[in-house]
Amino acid sequence: MGLLDDLKREADQARTAKEAETLRQAGLDRIFRAEIAPRLTQVHRYLGEMLKHLEDAERPVAAAFDIPALGRVEGFRQEAYTLRIDGHGTPKKVTLNCDCVLPEERKFTVPLGEAEPLRQHLISNQVMFTEWPVRGGTGPVQMLLFQAKLRVRAGLSFEADIEASKVRVISYNFEGLSIREYSFDYARIDAAWLDDMGRYLLREAKTLGYLEISEEARARLRQRAAEEKARQERLLALTQEKDKKSTEQGLLGGLRSLFGPGKRE
């Protein structure tokens, strides 16, 4: 097999790989437009209606946090919701942000060596505060007295993970002072999932991660996996067939060069 035949085979393989990748990307885009984007729209609509009902009912949502240097602080009230979607029709991201605040200012006495984590927490949450040194008699400063109306920023982000055909949910400060990330197959985003997410937003559920998938959703996922496997097998067969033809053509060309009209005994 000559150099040109080798290059032709490599070009054919590269072209086949590009065609396969183009088909794969087109399939992912179809899933995004037909399945993921509509579910993000449902999430946005559900949250919008939920926030309106909370406002009309004047229903409080309570929260508690382990604040640095202070320990467990109860009595936070979740409020000032902001809901956004990055585009109607084919959205890729829905975000909900809120503040959890104490209804009144409080004073907290903190040992001097533990004051810095609290100070940084207040600054990062844009909390106005005042602090005074507390001395032990005429001795050195031993404590700091903070006065502040504590606030904790919280939020949920729902994002299209197009490459994995999933919906990624990033939660911050809904499970204590923490960031959690969850990934859900798009088929799981149904009415029951939305209700579970709503209870999570109301802090009635401790986690968003362990949700049961319906048998119908399982069947859809199995079917999609079988279809993808069949498609990959067809592409592999096509590649092998092209390689076989390329090899046969190279051998035939070699025989012609050996026994063609230009050759003499």
Image (cartoon, helix red, strand yellow):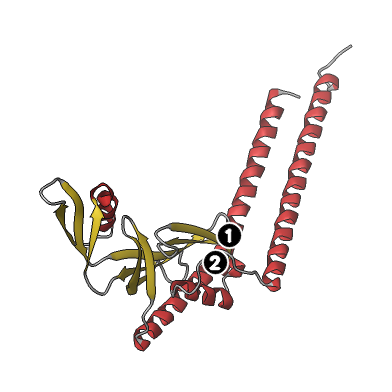
Depth check, front residue: 57 or 143 = 143
Q: Residues within 10 Å of mark 1 (few under 14, many from 20)?
A: many
x and y percentages locating residue 77 in the rendered image:
33, 74
Q: Image point 23% across, 49% down: which residue?
A: 112
Farthest residue toward the front?
A: 137
Q: Image point 49% across, 69% down: which residue?
A: 40
Farthest residue toward the left?
A: 138
Which comes sooner in the sequence, label 2 or label 1?
2
Q: Are marks 2 and 1 in contact (CB under 8 Å)?
A: yes
Residue 69's place in the image compared with 57, above or below, is above
| Disc number for residue 36 | 2
x and y percentages locating residue 182 in the rendered image:
52, 60
| Disc number for residue 165 | 1
Farthest residue toward the right?
A: 265
Q: Amino acid at mark 2?
A: Ile
Farthest residue toward the top?
A: 265
Q: Report the quarter where the N terminus lies.
A: top right
Q: Amino acid at mark 1?
A: Ser
